[in-house]
Each structure stands twice: as structure tokens, then as C-alpha cells.
Image (cartoon, helix red, strand yellow):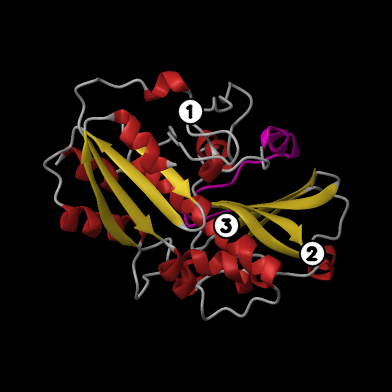
Amino acid sequence: MGLLSHISKSSARKKETVVSKKSGTGLLARAQKSVADSYSTFQQWAKSYGFEHCGVFTLVHGMYVISHAYGIDSQTIANSVSSKDFWSGTLDSKETVFNYSKDDQDFYDFLQFFSFDIKNEICHISFVKFNQGGEQAILMIFNMDSSKKINISLSDTAKLNLSERAKNLSLSKKDTDVSKNAEFQMFTLSLSESVESSIKSVQLPERSIYNCVLECIYDEITDLMSDAFPLPDIVVFAEPASVKIVLTNKSSIDELLLQSHINLLLTDLLCKPSVFPLLTTAGKTRNFEQVIDFLN
């Protein structure tokens, strides 16, 4: 039951452990390690500040859309497509930080972005305008606790790293050193049908925006799964739309029970989907080279 208990507690973890295949580098390429004042992924940054729900709007094909997210469901990401005119009209002052609560009339201008479940619970929203790659980006943080204020400043965005994603991180060789006697169970979690089904009610205007939404959701899933399966287990995002999981020395895990707990883990992120990601087994081995072949 150790694995199943740490799946159920994964959303409360602040430490992130992520591995992924990165094109052209191979599984064992050394990942960038976060230090005290920088973070390898957006999710690491969010966890370090204690934020539970946040995302970044960036420009894609002339429109703003959430491209990086933590604690935001798939329909909210898909609903986030918005125009430059909207943001210049709503965040139109020279200020960089904007805070709203239910007591503010402007608060309700932003509810259009959120899924039904979030819309009913959200209490505070903060936005920070900042420069990213020569273009304006907008950080959004929100919470569902009326007594809890959001503390954020422009200087905090300097520590954001939007160039790397959880699903593209690699693992350093030393982190893959495992016991020669370890037993590995290999699984593939297929995502595309479930993720696309979860946002089918949202009409997205253009293919590159649709692809950005999918990438953002896949990134969140990879981060969540990586928290649920920390080292010495391995989680790798595999293009175009699956997560490969390697469990170490957990031979007693039942596949159907594991599928059930993964469904529970992803229910909120995928807005209670009618179709869940499908878990399939790829066998067991004590040969780590076979694990490498599977992940690649």
C-alpha cells in the first residue's frame, strides 16, 4: 500500500521529481538542477512559493492562452484563449500587479476563463504583467480560500523558467543508479483520447493554439505523475501523447488497482472525464538496459 498512499498524497508534495525523454539528448542527459533562486520548471517555481493554482498566459498566434500551468484543470486551460485587446482593457494601468476578490466588480470579468467547478469556488485572483522573451506575459494566481491573501511581486517572476517543461526534463546518470538486483515494472499511460475528450466542449480558434493547450495539459499530467512516482520510480513523457512509468521493486502492485488510483489522481485535472487515460503493462525486467530501451 506504500505506492498507493503516496499517489493519494502527491498533490500535497512540494518537492518535484521529474524525468523525461528530451529529443536529441537521450534519457541519461544531465538535467538542469534548480538552485535556491531558480527553478527548472514552472511547477517547481509554483510549489516553492506555496501557490496551489497558477498559470502563465503567453502569446500564441496573436492570442493569449495559458501555456504553463499548475493546479489548473484542462477546461480552464482551453477556456483561457483571449485577445490582446481584452488584457489591455482590463489590466490597463502602469501597475504590474493586480489583485481582485469577490468584492471587486472587475473580479467577474475573469470568470469566463474558468471551468464550472473552479468558477464556483474561486475567491481571489492576482495577475502580474512581466516580460518574457521580448513579449508581455501574464502570470495568474488564484485561490479558493476567502481568508488567504495572495502575495506576489514583479521580482518573483524573474525566477520563472518558461523555457523548460516538466515533460521535457531529463534525469542525470547518478539518479538512475539503482540496485543491480532491482525489479522493474513498466507501464504506458495513453493520454490523447482522454485529454482531447476533456476539452471537446471548447471551440479553439486555431491549430497552434490547440496544440499549445494540449502541451500544457500533458505537462501538468507529467508533473503530477512524477510527484506520485518519485525516485527510484521513473516517469517519462513520450511523444506524441503518453507517459511511460517504471516502478522499482513494487512487484505486488495490481494493474487494475493502479489504473483506478491513477484515475482518481487525474479526475480533477481532466474535469471528471468520461474517458480516462489507459494504462497498459509492458512487462517486468531486472535488466536496466531494457528499461532504457522501453523509455526511449
| SS for dot 2 | helix
Between marks 2 and 3, how big is the CA–CA gap?
Answer: 23 Å
Label 3 close to label 1 by CB (< 8 Å): no
Earlier residue among tags 2 and 3: 2
Between marks 3 and 1, how big is the CA–CA gap?
Answer: 23 Å
Earlier residue among tags 2 and 1: 1
Q: Quadrant of residue 34?
A: top right
| SS for dot 1 | loop
Between marks 2 and 1, how big is the CA–CA gap?
Answer: 42 Å
Q: Quadrant of residue 45?
A: top right
Q: Which residue appears farthest toward the left when viewing the image?
A: 252
- Magenta residues, as a range? 141-160
- In front: 126, or 290? 290
The residue singled out by tag 1 in the image is 28
On screen, residue 12 versus residue 253, left or right, reads right
Q: In the rendered image, is residue 187 in sight?
A: yes
Q: Which mark is residue 215?
A: 3
User: Which residue: 68% across, 67% down?
Assistant: 209
